[in-house]
Image: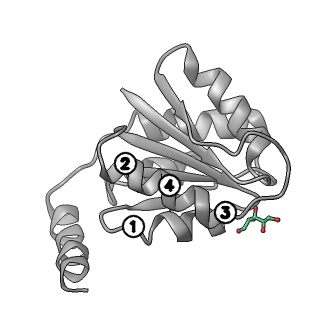
Amino acid sequence: MKIILAADHGGFDLKEIIKDYLSEKYEIEDLGTYSTSSVDYPDYGIKAGEAVINGVADKAIVFCGTGIGISIAANKVPGIRAALCHNVEYAKLSRQHNDANILALGGRFLSPQEAINIVEAWLNTDFEGDRHQKRLNKINVYERKH
Ligand code: RB5
């Protein structure tokens, strides 16, 4: 599985930690940012979203200070379901119920170990389909109309 990573300056440090952790098991493409110099999270959220929708990778993990801005940006790309997850339970539910294709993390609010636990849970939990698919279909229909 290939995983895209992207962050603004607020998420840069955590992105680097997760990149080191995941590189042993997965193919990683890092879309930046590549330092703690100030940048704008929409550039990275949208870039990560487009990469997933264009099939460059199966999933993406995005980071900013809170995870809020970059998840909002990624969710503007039609077909993206970016979930901001604060703990392992959120991560599992975002896969089981929402088929989240992007995980968003807040670099200023998670310890490295908390983030690793969330990432592991997210990558290793499957979508449950059924009634949840019916709900996602409603989002897909809305996106196609607008
Ligand atoms: C940058 O200072 C910060 O606003 C950004 O990383 C993020 O938290 C926005 O939602």
* Quadrant showing the C terminus: bottom left
Q: Amino acid at mark 1?
A: Val
- At mark 3, the secondary structure is helix
Instruction: Reply above or below: 142 against 118.
Output: below
Q: CA distance from mark 3 to mark 1?
A: 14 Å
As drawn, the label of residue 77 is 1
**Label 2 or label 1, whichever comes before in sequence order:** 2
As drawn, the label of residue 41 is 3
Question: CB of residue at label 3: within 8 Å of ligand 1?
Answer: yes
Residue at the spot of label 4: 47
Quadrant of the rendered image containing residue 5: top right
Query: Which one is nearer the viewer's eye here, 31 or 99?
Result: 31
Instruction: Reply above or below: 120 against 66.
Output: above
The percent coordinates of residue 114 (x first, y second) are 70, 39
- At mark 1, the secondary structure is loop
* Quadrant showing the N terminus: top left
Residue at the spot of label 2: 52
Q: CA distance from mark 3 to mark 2?
A: 17 Å
- At mark 2, the secondary structure is helix
Task: Check whether the beta carbons of the residues at disc 1 and disc 4 lie within 8 A of each other.
Answer: no
**Label 3 or label 2, whichever comes before in sequence order:** 3
Ligand 1's quadrant: bottom right
**Label 3 or label 1, whichever comes before in sequence order:** 3
Residue 59 in the figure: left or right of residue 90: left
